[in-house]
């Protein structure tokens, strides 16, 4: 792998997604005891640091909530254009992939907005994200956000902003891990409370179809995938797990 083709995620000192991470079975031993969460009845706002995080972490929830008639909004924070620094126009590609993925999850039922904050620099644009969030939530909103200690700077900053908003407005907050599954262990999160949303066959298939839309991340030609097969296994469960 040459320097020009190395993506910024693989360069993170915290983890390298190309390496095998924590076994799925170790996580499942803990998660099988987590209580089942009920679907929201009013509105859900899902916040995603990069296109594909919303499907990886909460695609089944998005499908099930939209199918039940719940109002679902997606706030896509960055376009993920810095995933491969030598790929011109990647941001536009990832926006198209996101649109295709949302059509696979819940055709015409998810209101999505892309903020276009520079990929890798969410921390410098917290106020903009905060303002966008405050315009979209109410007391009845379930806020679904990345785990604030996920290990990627954009995930962490986005998660921290969402926690601030949730506390300020007394919102229910479900936090989805992405890279935590790979580089952390159940023991490190032993003090956290977990909940699960069970996915039926239709939700699992919709999520799989949506994930398949992110070709740039899972099957890039001539590049190492950002999300290799062994990482995708964390998101193929018949449930989605959230930190509460």
Image (cartoon, rainbow, N blue to C red):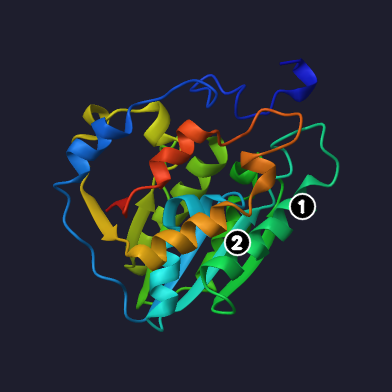
Query: In x, y percent, where is residue 233?
Result: 42, 39
Instruction: Please state, as top left, top right, bottom left or bottom right, where the N terminus lies in the image.
Output: top right
In the drawing, does residue 29 fall left or right of residue 150?
A: left
Q: Is residue 108 above or below residue 209?
A: below
Q: Is residue 100 above or below residue 9?
A: below
Residue farthest to the bottom?
69
Q: Quadrant of residue 198?
A: bottom left
Pointer 2 and pointer 1: residues touching (CB < 8 Å)? Answer: no
In the drawing, does residue 206 fall left or right of residue 96?
A: left
Q: CA distance from mark 2 to mark 1?
A: 12 Å
Res. 126 visible in picture: yes
Could you say which is closer to the camera, residue 49 or residue 33? 33
Q: Is residue 73 above or below residue 29?
A: below
Could you say which is closer to the camera, residue 154 or residue 67? 67
Q: Residue at x 76, y 24 (%)?
A: 5
Q: Residue at x 40, y 59 (%)?
A: 204
Pointer 2 residue: 101
Pointer 1 residue: 93
Query: In x, y percent, where is residue 62?
Result: 44, 67
């Amino acid at each position: 792998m040459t320097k020009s083709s190395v993506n910024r995620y693989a360069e993170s000192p915290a983890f390298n997604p190309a390496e095998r991470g924590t076994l799925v079975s170790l996580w499942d031993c803990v998660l099988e005891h987590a209580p089942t969460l009920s679907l929201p009845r009013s509105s859900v706002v899902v916040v995603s640091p990069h296109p594909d995080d919303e499907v990886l972490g909460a695609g089944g929830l998005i499908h099930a909530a939209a199918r039940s008639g719940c109002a679902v909004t997606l706030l896509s924070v960055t376009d993920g254009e810095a995933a491969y620094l030598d790929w011109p126009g990647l941001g536009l590609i990832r926006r198209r992939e996101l649109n295709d993925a949302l059509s696979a999850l819940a055709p015409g039922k998810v209101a999505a907005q892309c903020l276009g904050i520079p990929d890798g620099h969410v921390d410098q644009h917290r106020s903009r994200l905060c303002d966008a969030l405050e315009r979209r939530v109410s007391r009845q909103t379930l806020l679904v956000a990345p785990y604030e200690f996920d290990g990627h700077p954009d995930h962490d900053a986005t998660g921290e902003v969402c926690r601030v908003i949730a506390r300020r407005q007394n919102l229910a907050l479900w936090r989805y891990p992405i890279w935590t599954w790979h580089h952390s262990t159940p023991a490190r999160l032993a003090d956290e409370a977990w909940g699960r949303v069970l996915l039926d066959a239709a939700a699992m298939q919709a999520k799989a179809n949506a994930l398949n839309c992110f070709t740039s991340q899972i099957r890039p030609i001539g590049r190492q995938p950002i999300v290799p097969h062994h990482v995708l296994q964390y998101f193929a469960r018949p449930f989605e797990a959230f930190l509460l």
